[in-house]
Amino acid sequence: MNSERLPRAKKSLGQNFLVDKNICAKIVDLLQLTPEDHVLEIGPGRGALTEFLIQAAPAGITVLEKDNELAERLEGRYPDLKVIRMDALDFQWEELTPGTKVIGNLPYNIASKLIWDIVSKADMIAKATFMVQHEVALRLTAEPNTKEYGGLTVWVKNHATTEYRFKVPPHVFRPKPRVDSAIVDFFPLPEKKRPKNPEQLSTFIKMCFQKRRKQMANILKKQWNTQASEWFEYQKLSPKIRPENITPEQFESLSRLV
Ligand code: SAM
């Protein structure tokens, strides 16, 4: 196991720096970089993953770092690296070069929000590989009828297929986080499989999962109409089922009726 001595990190930005080089190499390998690829790294920090991205020698690497000190340090260490200093939550995902591969050991406090945004706006990316809190990785890859299945699962799976890759234990970070982490891969769905009306779907998902223990008939009481009734009949589903019993595709079609 490789480890380096690191100065005290600023915890406010969710800086748990990965210090195990074998794990960094394994994460970057998942991107399967070719010399034609463009890569965007979110939150490079001290460059643990960046170092392996540079070794893989793709056509272009851009990093997005909010912390000025860390961004400056990276610019000093890698003068050819394109460093964008900004909050990833403000990034215009629609403007990415088509086919870009996105990677990041994401700041855990904003990971779910960032992923919600990226999967829905960056439909032209080739794939994304993110490290997130283990619990979030389970939600991102959950199947219906499980306790991990929720609004984030439904939204993400309406935009991308997800693959749980591997678990990363706390002792490979400095400072050591209290939680396990895991790597998840995302592959955007083709245009025809993405939601027809994403805003409507997003509102519908939030409404349903705010009351996840309630039955659908109860959640939809105010919106209930003939179409909704026929939809449940056609899907051979009882209106007494709960949000966690409905597949991502069924959510999308139901959201267009109520
Ligand atoms: N990639 C490094 C690694 O694997 O060791 C650092 C990962 S650390 C968990 C998260 C990084 O994201 C930090 O460098 C932090 O400064 C940066 N960060 C935190 N919030 C951010 C935001 N809103 N936008 C961009 N970067 C952010």
Image (cartoon, rainbow, N blue to C red):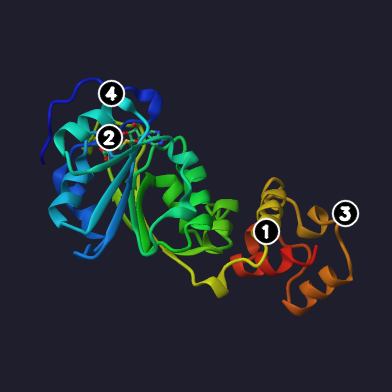
Dot 3 amino acid type? Lys
Q: How crowded is the residue under tag 2: few (<14 C-alpha within 10 Å), some, or many (20+)? A: many
Is 161 above or below relative to 2?
below
Q: Nearer the viewer, residue 91 or 162?
A: 91
Residue 138 shown left or right of residue 24 in the figure: right
Q: State the SS at label 4.
A: loop
Q: State the SS at label 2.
A: loop
Q: Nearer the viewer, residue 210 or 147?
A: 210
The outermost residue toward the top is 8
Ligand 1 appears in which quadrant?
top left
Task: Tell me, yes or no, whether the two marked residues, 3 and 4, touch with CB atoms within 8 Å.
Answer: no
Q: Which mark is residue 9?
A: 4
User: For the residue with label 2, is its CB less than 8 Å from the closest atom of ligand 1?
Assistant: yes
Q: How crowded is the residue under tag 1: few (<14 C-alpha within 10 Å), some, or many (20+)? A: many
Which residue is rendered at x = 46% and y = 59% of the image?
141
Which residue is rendered at x = 52% and y = 63% of the image?
159
First in sequence, mark 1 or 4: give its number: 4
Q: In which quadrant of the rendered image does the C terminus lie?
A: bottom right
First in sequence, mark 3 or 4: give its number: 4
